[in-house]
C-alpha cells in the first residue's frame, strides 16, 4: 500500500509491509461479528480456510506479475494476454476498480463504526454513514494535495496497528471468560449444529479481508530482486495475516459472548473488549481499528486511483479520469471517493462485504484461469492453478447460493450492479485502443 515511495529499491521488509498493510485494513474488524453470527466458534477455521484460498489466488498474481512486470497488475495481465480482446480487458478494468471502490466503502464504514462505538450514536446508522463520508473526504484531499511523505506515514501506521492488534489478542486471551476445554466443547457443538457448507460460505465471505496482497505487484518495478522478493513478500504476508486473524478471532471468542458479537457486528471487538477488560481494552481496539482503516483508505485510494487512470488512458473510462496534475490523477481520486460514498449511502456493511468478496473472488478466478492458460510461459504448476480455479470457483458459487437462499433481494441488487458495470465496459470497449501497450 505504500507504493507511493520515491525509492527505487524496495526490499523484502518494505514489500511485506505493503502486503500486510493492504490486507489488515479493517477486514478482520468487519468480518468477525458477521462470521460469529453465522457459525459461532467455528469462525477461526473459516478464517484460516479463507486465507488458504487467498494463498492459492496469490500464486497466479505472483507468476503473472513476474512474467509481465507491469504495475497495472490485474488489468494489465488481461490486456497483455489478450491484446485483441478489448471487451474482456474493459470488463476486468471496471470490475477491479469498482471492487476497490467497495473496499474503500467497507474501510470507511468500519472506521466510523469504531470511531463512535463508545458514544450515544453507536447504533445510529446515519451517524456512521456521515462520519464514513467525512473520513473519505479527508483522505481524498490528502491524496489530491499532499502525497509526499505518505509512504513513511503508511509504514508507521502498518507496524503500529500490527503491534496493537497483537497486544489486543494476548490481553483478550489472558482475560478469557471460558477455559480451553469449554472452548473446544463449544467448537464441537457448533460443528454439530453447522455443516461444511456453512463453514465454506463464511470462508468465502472472509476473502475480502485478505484482499490487498496484490498491491505488491504495483511496486514490481521499484523492488530489489523481484524474482525472489515478490513471492517471499506475498506468501509471508498472507501467512502472517492468517495467524493474526485466527489469534484475534480466538481471543474474541474466549472473552466475548457470541450473542454480543452477533448483535454489535460492526464494532463487535471494541464492545466486547470493553466489557472483558474495561475501557483500556475498548480504547486499544478502537485505536487499532482507526489506524487499520485509515492506512487502508489512504493506500487503496492511492494505488487504485492510478490503476483507474491507466484504464482511462486506454479509453475504457472517461478520458477526464486519466488527467494528472503534478503526476497525481486528481479526477480519478475524486471519482473513487465519490462512488465509495454513494455505496455507503445506498447499502449497509453486509452488502458491501459480500459485494467486495464476490468481486475479488471473480477477479482472482479470472487471474487463475489466465495463468493456467499460459502456464508454460509463466512456469506455473498446472496442479496449483487448477486447485486455485476450483477453490475460487467454489467460493463464488457458495456466496451466490447463500445470497439467493437467504437474501435474494440483496443478490438482485448486486447482479444489477454487475450488469451496469458490464454495460459500461461494453460501451467503452468500442472506443478503447490499448494506448498503454
Image (tube, helix red, strand yellow):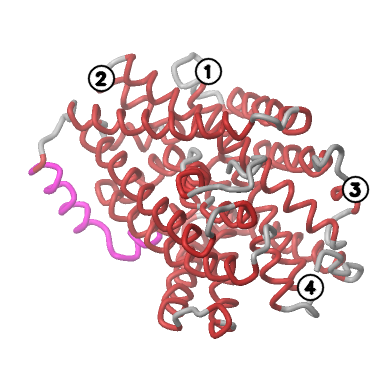
Q: Earlier in the sequence, mark 1 or mark 2?
A: 1
Closer to viewer: mark 3 or mark 1? 3
Residue at the spot of label 4? 87
Q: Earlier in the sequence, mark 4 or mark 1?
A: 4
Query: What numbered label is drawn on residue 97?
Result: none
Magenta segment range?
181-201
Residue at the spot of label 3? 320
Residue at the spot of label 2? 277
Q: Is residue 434 left or right of residue 304?
A: right
Q: Quadrant of residue 376?
A: bottom right
Q: Residue at 76% of width from left, 40% of height from top?
A: 333
Q: Is residue 208 magenta?
A: no
Q: Quadrant of residue 360?
A: bottom right
Query: What numbered label is drawn on residue 121?
Result: 1
- Asked whether disc 2 touches disc 4, contact meaning CB atoms under 8 Å apart, the reply is no
Q: Residue at 28% of width from left, 37% of height from top?
A: 258
Amino acid at each position: 500500500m505504500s507504493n507511493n515511495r520515491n525509492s527505487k529499491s524496495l526490499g523484502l521488509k518494505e514489500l511485506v509491509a505493503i502486503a500486510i498493510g493492504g490486507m489488515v485494513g479493517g477486514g478482520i474488524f468487519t468480518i468477525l461479528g458477521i462470521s460469529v453470527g453465522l457459525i459461532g466458534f467455528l469462525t477461526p477455521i473459516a478464517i484460516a480456510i479463507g486465507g488458504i484460498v487467498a494463498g492459492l489466488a496469490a500464486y497466479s498474481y505472483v507468476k503473472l506479475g513476474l512474467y509481465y512486470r507491469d504495475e497495472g497488475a490485474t488489468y494489465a495481465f488481461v490486456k497483455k494476454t489478450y491484446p485483441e480482446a478489448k471487451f474482456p480487458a474493459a470488463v476486468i478494468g471496471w470490475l477491479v476498480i469498482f471492487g476497490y471502490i467497495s473496499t474503500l466503502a467497507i474501510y470507511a464504514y468500519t472506521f466510523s463504526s469504531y470511531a463512535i462505538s463508545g458514544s450515544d450514536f453507536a447504533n445510529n446508522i446515519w451517524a456512521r454513514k456521515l462520519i464514513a463520508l467525512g473520513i473519505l473526504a479527508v483522505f481524498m484531499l490528502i491524496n489530491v494535495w499532499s502525497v509526499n511523505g505518505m509512504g513513511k506515514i503508511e509504514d508507521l501506521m502498518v507496524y503500529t496497528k500490527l503491534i496493537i492488534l497483537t497486544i489486543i489478542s494476548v490481553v483478550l486471551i489472558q482475560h478469557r471468560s471460558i477455559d480451553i476445554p469449554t472452548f473446544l466443547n463449544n467448537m464441537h457443538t457448533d460443528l454439530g449444529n453447522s455443516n461444511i457448507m456453512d463453514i465454506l460460505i463464511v470462508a468465502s465471505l472472509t476473502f475480502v479481508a485478505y484482499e490487498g496482497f496484490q498491491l505488491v505487484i504495483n511496486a514490481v518495478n521499484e523492488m530489489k530482486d523481484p524474482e525472489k522478493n515478490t513471492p517471499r513478500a506475498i506468501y509471508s504476508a498472507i501467512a502472517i495475516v492468517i495467524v493474526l486473524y485466527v489469534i484475534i478471532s480466538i481471543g474474541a471468542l474466549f472473552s466475548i459472548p457470541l450473542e454480543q458479537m452477533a448483535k454489535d457486528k460492526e464494532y463487535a471487538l471494541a464492545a466486547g473488549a470493553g466489557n472483558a477488560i474495561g475501557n483500556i481494552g475498548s480504547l486499544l481496539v478502537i485505536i487499532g481499528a482507526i489506524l487499520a482503516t485509515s492506512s487502508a483508505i489512504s493506500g487503496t485510494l492511492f494505488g487504485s486511483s492510478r490503476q483507474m487512470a491507466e484504464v482511462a488512458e486506454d479509453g475504457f473510462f472517461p478520458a477526464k479520469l486519466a488527467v494528472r496534475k503534478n503526476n497525481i490523477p486528481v479526477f480519478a481520486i475524486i471519482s473513487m471517493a465519490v462512488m465509495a460514498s454513494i455505496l455507503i449511502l445506498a447499502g449497509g456493511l453486509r452488502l458491501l462485504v459480500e459485494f467486495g468478496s464476490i468481486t475479488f473472488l471473480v477477479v482472482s478466478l479470472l487471474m487463475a484461469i489466465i495463468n493456467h492458460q499460459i502456464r508454460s510461459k509463466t512456469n506455473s504448476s498446472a496442479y496449483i492453478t487448477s486447485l486455485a480455479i476450483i477453490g475460487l470457483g467454489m467460493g463464488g458459487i457458495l456466496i451466490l447460493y447463500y445470497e439467493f437462499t437467504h437474501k435474494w433481494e440483496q443478490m438482485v441488487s448486486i447482479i444489477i450492479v454487475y450488469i451496469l458495470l458490464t454495460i459500461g465496459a461494453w460501451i467503452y470497449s468500442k472506443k478503447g485502443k490499448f494506448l498503454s501497450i
